Amino acid sequence: MPTADELISPDSIRRLAVVLQEAAPGTSRWHAVEDSSTTLGPLGLGERARAVADALLADSGHDFERLAHAVRQALSRADLTGWMIWPVTEAVAVAATESGTGGHFDAGLDLLARLTPRLTGEFALRTFLNADLDRTLATALTWTDSPDPAVRRLASEGSRPKLPWARQVPELNRNPAATVPLLDRLHTDASQDVRRSVANHLNDISRLDAELAAGTAARWLRHAEPTTPALVRHAMRTLVKKGEPAALELVGFHGNPGELSVVGPLLAETAVPLGGAIDFTAHITNVSAGPVSLAIDYVIHHMKANGKTAPKVFKLTKRSLAPGESAEVRRTHSFRPISTRVYYPGAHAVHLQINGHEFGLTGFSLLETEEAP
């Protein structure tokens, strides 16, 4: 992945100053923008965007009309493009929301939509959302009818509750249902990029309100387009990993506890040295009159430093079983030290998780002594 210095680079910011000067020579000399290119060295990507945005605001006197005029003029040039767009969108958002004028707020959103095809305006949209959520979402709803897929994507991506790299919008965390009308408009979009944004957005919602996310996906599937099942699978990935039964059923796994006979997990040993492994098997039989489709995981309850255990889900396999059919599953789970997990000796446990339901909690001990090399 390119570094921050390769994306918002000193050279790109010097070019931004030239673009603005040549496009709108009477607005400012853009000296602060040019000077900011010399201060980017130690800054991360988001910090670079904010530093250059501050320089744009300084050069325009925090005057939205002056800044917006220069940006509109620069939009006529093909070289206003790439990662220099991020600080421009941030400056537009701050100037528009700080002016206190409703007309500037709406004009700022319009300018954001014009800028977003050059890179994206998703990060700057957060400033508008935090300033006036309802007004911003109302405008975003109109973007869902835009002929430009970049603008339609902005409506979904910019309003994601957990957008990576972006500042938080606390009200979206408190009320994740606020953005569902946008997703309802966009989940069958012709653009794969837009649909992927919708799936990621619904996945964000699933981390805040699992019932809302699964219910929304189920509603879409009742009137599905050919692209809808794939979108739902991507959107439900967090809930599927957690073993949420409703999400698992939406992506094609069916079979409830009453339809299964499960023996296990059966452990080869009930104590394992640090650095060793446990081996277990399990037998699963479909005792129902119809076929079942199973997502079979297992959960290790690890001992923590505070003396309590915490569960961790691990993928095992997927199986389809006809009526009366059985399957045996096996797994070796290592306790060899790794950089991402610290193992503590003491009482542990393992259980199967089949279509989100727990079967056969079985205890074992992780010993303090290490396995001999």
Image (cartoon, rainbow, N blue to C red):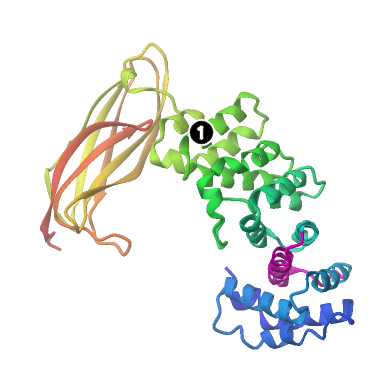
| Secondary structure, magenta segment, majority class | helix
- Residue found at x 63% / y 74%: 50
Q: Find disc 1 in the rendering and name its residue.
A: 214
Front in this rendered view, residue 86 or 350: 86
Image side of residue 247 versus residue 128, left or right: left
The part of the image, by quadrant, that contains residue 217 is top right
Please report the residue visible at 70 percent of the width from the left and 80 percent of the height from the top: 55
109 w.r.t. 81: above or below: above
Counting from the top left corner in percent of width and height, residue 304 is at: 21, 55
In which quadrant of the rendered view does residue 74 lie?
A: bottom right
Q: Amino acid at mark 1?
A: Ala
- Is residue 100 on the magenta stretch? yes
Which element type, helix, strand or loop, lies under badge 1?
A: helix
Q: Which residues are magenta?
A: 77-101
Relative vertical location of residue 47 with respect to residue 282 in this rendering, above or below: below
Using the rendered image of the protein, determine whether residue 3 is visible from the camera's viewpoint: no
- The x, y position of residue 124, in whole percent, is 66, 62
Q: Position of residue 261 (x, y in %)?
A: 27, 21
Q: Examine the rendered structure and indicate whether residue 272 appears above or below residue 227.
A: below
Question: Image quarter for residue 69?
Answer: bottom right
**Image point 34% across, 44% down: which residue?**
314
Quick check: can you spot residue 367? yes
